[in-house]
């Protein structure tokens, strides 16, 4: 899912990573492989945020999902992997941001 700026800030407060800006040259390639997401890159690899669980968005848990890991210790290239939920994250109330892209 694509996150709004305030949601990105919430994630970065909880995750030792950097967000890959939407205008970064690698984003089109990442989106062609993983779909439209806000991408977070860190020491463990590439993560996205997904909601899941309850029927209503306000009841859903927000998960941090690793979608690629580093190919080697130099951390110069990523290898796609099966999606792996690594943690839950708080991105703020689901119903408080009517512009949230889900």
Image (cartoon, rainbow, N blue to C red):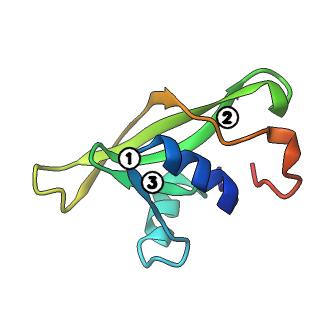
Query: Among all residues in the image, which is located at the extreme left?
Result: 73
Q: Residue at x 66, y 51 (%)?
A: 7
On the image, the x and y values in percent for residue 12 come to: 50, 50
Q: Is residue 16 above or below residue 83?
A: below
Earlier-in-chain disc, 3 versus 2: 3
Q: Which quadrant would residue 22 be assigned to in this image?
A: bottom right
Between residues 9 and 82, which one lies in front from this camera angle? 9
Distance of label 3 from label 2 (alpha carbons): 16 Å
Residue named by callout 2: 51
Circle on res. 16: 1
Residue named by callout 3: 40
Q: Which quadrant would residue 30 be assigned to in this image?
A: bottom left
For mark 3, does the 10 Å Cα neighbourhood hold few (<14), some (14 to 19), or many (20 or more) residues? many
Element marked by disc 1: loop
Query: Among all residues in the image, which is located at the extreme top?
Result: 54
Earlier-in-chain disc, 3 versus 1: 1
Decide if residue 92 is on the left or right side of residue 8: right
Q: Is residue 30 above or below residue 52?
A: below
Q: Residue at x 12, y 49 (%)?
A: 72
């Amino acid at each position: 899912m694509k996150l709004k700026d305030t949601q990105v800030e919430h994630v970065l407060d909880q995750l030792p990573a950097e967000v890959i800006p939407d205008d970064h040259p690698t984003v089109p390639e990442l989106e062609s492989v993983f779909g439209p997401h806000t991408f977070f890159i860190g020491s463990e690899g590439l993560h996205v945020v997904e909601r899941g669980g309850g029927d209503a968005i306000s009841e859903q848990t927000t998960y941090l999902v690793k979608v690629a890991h580093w190919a080697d210790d130099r951390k110069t290239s990523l290898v796609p992997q099966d999606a792996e939920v690594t943690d839950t994250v708080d991105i703020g109330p689901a119903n408080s941001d009517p512009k949230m892209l889900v």
